């Protein structure tokens, strides 16, 4: 951790712990701004911030707001997820076995090498599992009985 970050963090914690009013609003905002700039040096944080800024700008300029943003995000996410699933998750199996006459006959008869392996859409990734379960739980009103 760099010296500037340590100084900023220690000053904020010291002010919070002691309850002193020595830190005025301007000084606090300056520290928060500095720590934000230091965080943007990280490539991941910068990518997240830049993407959020671009999407916010596009949504505001195009007049998309409210529920439309949710629908647009769901559509975008579904398309990207489908492309990822199609080209990176589905694969041809690699069959490993000891080459004996009996094993070769079983493998040829089962045609395991010719069929594509398609895992279920919620089981190949923990993030996918979370999002699919969230979507299914939000559709629960379709089969719930009203009291």
Image (tube, grey):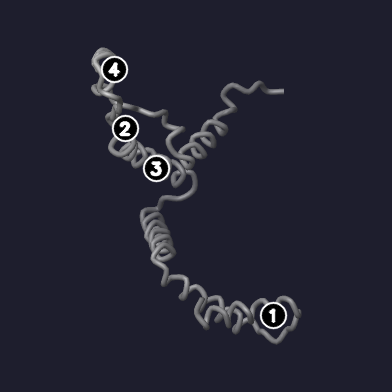
C-alpha distance separating marks 3 and 2: 18 Å
In the picture provided, is 36 more to the left or to the right than 88? right
Q: Are marks 3 and 4 in contact (CB under 8 Å)?
A: no
C-alpha distance separating marks 3 and 4: 43 Å
Q: Are marks 1 and 2 in contact (CB under 8 Å)?
A: no
Label 3 vs 4, first from the N-terminus: 3
Q: Which mark is residue 77?
A: 3
State which mark lies toward you, 4 or 1. 4
State which mark lies toward you, 1 or 2. 2
In the image, residue 92 lies at what x, y percent?
27, 29
Q: Are marks 4 and 1 in contact (CB under 8 Å)?
A: no
Q: Quadrant of residue 93?
A: top left
Residue picked out by circle 2: 90
Q: Secondary structure at mark 2?
A: loop
Q: Secondary structure at mark 4?
A: helix
In the image, residue 66 lies at what x, y percent?
49, 48
State which mark lies toward you, 3 or 2. 2
Label 1 vs 2, first from the N-terminus: 1
Q: Which mark is residue 103?
A: 4
State which mark lies toward you, 2 or 4. 4
Task: Name the image quarter holding the C terminus.
Answer: top right
Label 4 vs 1, first from the N-terminus: 1
């Amino acid at each position: 951790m760099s010296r500037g970050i340590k100084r900023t963090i220690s000053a904020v914690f010291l002010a919070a712990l002691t309850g002193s009013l020595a830190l005025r609003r301007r000084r606090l905002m300056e520290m928060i701004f500095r720590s934000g700039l230091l965080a943007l040096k990280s490539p991941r944080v910068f990518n997240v911030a830049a993407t959020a800024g671009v999407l916010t700008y596009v949504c505001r300029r195009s007049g998309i707001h409210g529920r439309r943003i949710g629908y647009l995000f769901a559509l975008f996410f579904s398309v990207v997820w489908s492309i990822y699933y199609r080209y990176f998750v589905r694969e041809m199996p690699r069959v490993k076995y000891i080459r004996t006459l009996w094993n070769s006959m079983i493998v040829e008869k089962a045609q395991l090498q010719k069929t594509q392996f398609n895992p279920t859409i919620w089981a190949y990734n923990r993030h996918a599992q979370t999002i699919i379960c969230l979507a299914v739980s939000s559709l629960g009103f379709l089969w719930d009985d009203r009291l």
